[in-house]
Amino acid sequence: DGGITQSPKYLFRKEGQNVTLSCEQNLNHDAMYWYRQDPGQGLRLIYYSQIVNDFQKGDIAEGYSVSREKKESFPLTVTSAQKNPTAFYLCASSIPGTRGNTIYFGEGSWLTVV
Amino acid sequence: AQSVTQPDIHITVSEGASLELRCNYSYGATPYLFWYVQSPGQGLQLLLKYFSGDTLVQGIKGFEAEFKRSQSSFNLRKPSVHWSDAAEYFCAVVRYGGSQGNLIFGKGTKLSVKP
């Protein structure tokens, strides 16, 4: 079945480490997104990419980096510069420019700093 | 700046009772609005969406929402709640000038269902 796969589901990071969250989609969508979710805060946009080899910062990009070398993949790296990385991270994809289409979300990844 | 407000952080209803979750948005033009549901530790599932046309939108699982431009609201309703509806509900709007997935979310309303 088509969908978005995020891995790992649970990840633990030590202080000062960089970690990378994987997001893969087989929906043939051009646009992909990363959101962060904190309790009581809703979802906030970290980065998005509307086409391969191009991406833009969202509302809370500091301390994060992304790449978009392939259409189906949009990994997120949480760097040591991110002061409070413990959160639930959600990846999403859509067809850009067609506002009537649905945005699909993955099942999320939990990141905890230990 | 654009924003989405869900005034109720937590709502408890009895099974079989009706439900209304409130959502208010700030937006100058015609908004593109969504309601999502999230079970604990899971991703988001789309319940319904509004882009234009009929202001009463039907969604999955028996949910509906009504767009009221005069009140800047997009409230979610269900006539009879089931225990399986217990979850967190998010209202979202497409960011002005943004692409489809560039959403601004409310902070969510957690729904508990009493037997």
Image (cartoon, coloured by chain):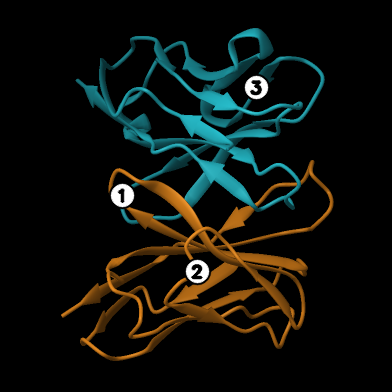
Chain colours: A orange, B cyan
Residue A82: x percent and y percent? 35, 76
Are labels 1 and 2 assigned to the same chain?
no
The 10 Å Cα crowd at callout 1, few under 14, some 14 to 19, many 20 or more, is few
- SS category of the residue bearing label 1: loop
Tell me which amino acid carries mark 1: Pro
Residue B59: x percent and y percent? 61, 28
- SS category of the residue bearing label 2: loop
The 10 Å Cα crowd at callout 2, few under 14, some 14 to 19, many 20 or more, is some
- Give the residue at x 62% y 84%: A67
The disc label shown at residue A61, or none:
2
- Report whether residue A2 is seen: no
For label 3, the residue is B58
- SS category of the residue bearing label 3: strand
For label 1, the residue is B40
Residue A39: x percent and y percent? 28, 49
Say whether disc 3 or disc 1 marks the residue closer to the N-terminus: 1
Using the rendered view, name the quadrant where residue B62 is placed: top right
The 10 Å Cα crowd at callout 3, few under 14, some 14 to 19, many 20 or more, is some
- Give the residue at x 76% y 26%: B30
